[in-house]
Image (cartoon, helix red, strand yellow):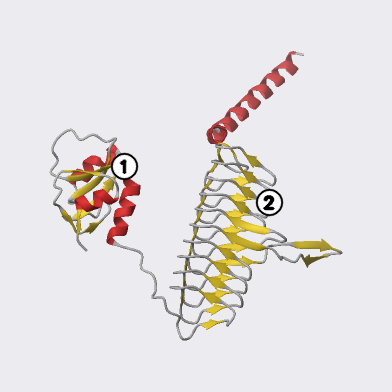
Amino acid sequence: MLKNIKELAEIVQGVVLGDESLTLLGVASLENAKTGDVIFVESAKFLAKALESAASAIVLSKKISLSESTGKTFIIVDYPKLAFSKIIREFFPITKPLAITHSSAIISETSQLALGASVGAYSVIGENTRIGKNSSIGIHCVIGRDVEIGENSIIHSNVTVYDKVKIGNNVIIHSNTVIGSDGFGYVFHQGEYHKFPQIGDVIIENNVEIGSNVSIDRGALGSTIIGQGTKIDNLVQIAHNVKIGKNCVLAAQVGVSGSSIIEDNVVVGGQVGIADHVKLETGSIIGAQAGIPTGKIIRKGLMVWGTPARPIDDFKTIYAHTQNLPALKERVIKIEKQLSQLDKLDKLDN
């Protein structure tokens, strides 16, 4: 697919510096670029390598100055990575299945499929479920009863959506994810666990993307909520009654226990464990592998790390001291020996 650089610059609201007639063949990384490719550079430290590459064009931050003629053509923008992502889509547009229902799909007579909706082979759509305009259900999916799926959403293969789940517009759910399974709720009485019925639901708002092999439990009595624009990586567990705000990011292998609240614009690193009834306030950042104990509140905008999680500067100080423990141990042993010798001398003098 051939693209003119001036047309691409207009799409990303950039300015061409160099040959405006240049035709580009594709996109590439800095390391793999060939003649005809466009790459991007966000930091000045990568500029020299980009200029040495075979790439024909570079999407460059306007904050990076060019001291001399380079022989390259540039698209100058405010945010290179964002602009580059849009350029990638020009070369590789999202393709959706044809708006048809496969003959092997089982669809309840009481369900409703809007114009342009599609259902893949061997999928099952339950009673009273509504699928919005131009949304697609992949192969081998199970969509339960009384489910609502909005417009332009993509449910990839082997996804299971339990009853009474609400999914908004422009949502992407990747393969093998389960939405609306029972929360881990039990009552211990007379030596055994009794299941506490999980009769709530899950609400997934607009523009959410959920990775593969994610489990999101329904609320026990109320709702588990995933807020608008939030992105959830693969292998994440969201327990019952959790409330996640807008534009949050949860990296792989995060576990969020029941009734925790994650406010807007929170970033959670990989393998973070969040206990029950935790509150992560707006804009907080949780470093990878941190542990947040039950009932803990991480204040607005705070960055924490470690287990139990603490402000990152405190964690670094403590961690630095732990590296000195072997030397400190030797010093203590030496001081104890000296004190022991002094004690023996004192006894001899007496």
Locate residue 345 relative to residue 273 in the image: left or right: right
Give above or below for 175 relative to 269. Answer: below
Q: Residues within 10 Å of mark 1 (few under 14, many from 20)?
A: some
Please give the residue where the numbered disc 1 appears in the rendered image: 42
Going from N to C along the chain, the mark reached first, 2 or 1, is: 1
Residue matched to label 2 = 276
Q: Is residue 157 visible?
A: yes
x, y (%) of residue 188?
81, 62
Give the x, y percent position of residue 103.
46, 86
**Can you see residue 240?**
no
* Most foreground residue, 121 or 288: 121
Residue 57 in percent (x, y) is at: 20, 49
Residue extending furthest toward the top: 349
Is residue 252 left or right of 69 when viewed as pictured? right
Point 39% across, 70% down: residue: 96
> What residue sits 15% from the left and 52% below the top?
22
Q: Amino acid at mark 1?
A: Glu
Tell me where residue 142 appears, x and y as whole percent.
55, 75
Q: Secondary structure at mark 1?
A: loop
Label 2 secondary element: loop
Dot 2 amino acid type: Asp
Residue for point 75% across, 18% down: 347
For marks 2 and 1, give the CA distance: 39 Å
Of the pair 23 and 321, the residue shown nearer to us: 23
Residue 157 vs 287, above or below: the answer is below
